[in-house]
Image (cartoon, rainbow, N blue to C red):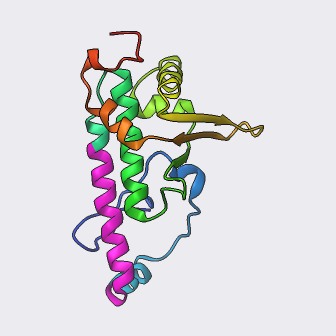
Amino acid sequence: MRNLPLGYGLVGQAFPSLVEAYKTTDVVKLPLEVVQALYEGSEVFQSRYDLLFELREKFQYHLLNCSTYPPQAVASLLRALIYQERSLGNQPAADRTYRFDLPVDLIARTCQLNQRTVEQVLKGMQQAQLVTLHKDDDASADLIHVLDPEGLKETYSATRDKVSWWPLK
């Protein structure tokens, strides 16, 4: 989706998440006039559009806070996704966990880390019982279940020597 001259902000993508959108979004091309008429004629559409703009900006803010310290970088990405999903009302699940279909290479690119480092961070998070990892037979499915969002918040705000499960200090 192109930037649209609607509302108080411009939309750069059709979905606020740069991470999950490629797997979960179907794109439909609509003429600008139709979208503008929807925006002007529907409070629901207008509020959803404005919410998506706000979430995109907040997601970008979380990514700007990505540290070079791997546990903080991965935790900041997961916190951004949790905030986004909670705001959209999609998650948490009934058991208060968050589920993301998120390949390691995508986490690595987003956090600007190498894949092996991300794998080690996820393994440490799994040992600390912050997340569980599930690999399906389908090679495209990399499911991460966030079990303890508050624990992730601690990792997100921790300094280098306070993440006990990370071996490289």
Percent of width and height locating residue 12: 36, 57
**Image location (x, y in percent) of residue 146:** 49, 41
The residue positioned 40% from the left and 43% from the top of the image is 149
Q: Residue at x 54, y 30 (%)?
A: 105
Q: Give the residue at the far right of this rendering.
A: 137
- Quarter of the N terminus within the rendering: bottom left
- Quarter occupied by residue 14: bottom left
> Is residue 94 shown left or right of residue 9?
right
Near-viewer residue (151 or 122): 151
Residue ID at (41%, 49%): 82
In the depicted structure, whether residue 10 falls above or below residue 80: below
Instruction: Name the spot of residue 60 as percent of width and height, x first.
Output: 30, 46
Residue found at the far left of this picture: 8
From the viewer's perspective, is residue 26 above or below residue 127? below
43 on left or right of 7: right
Q: Quadrant of the C terminus?
A: top left
Q: Is residue 160 magenta?
A: no
**Image quarter of residue 140:** top right
Specify start and end residues of the magenta stretch as a single range: 40-61
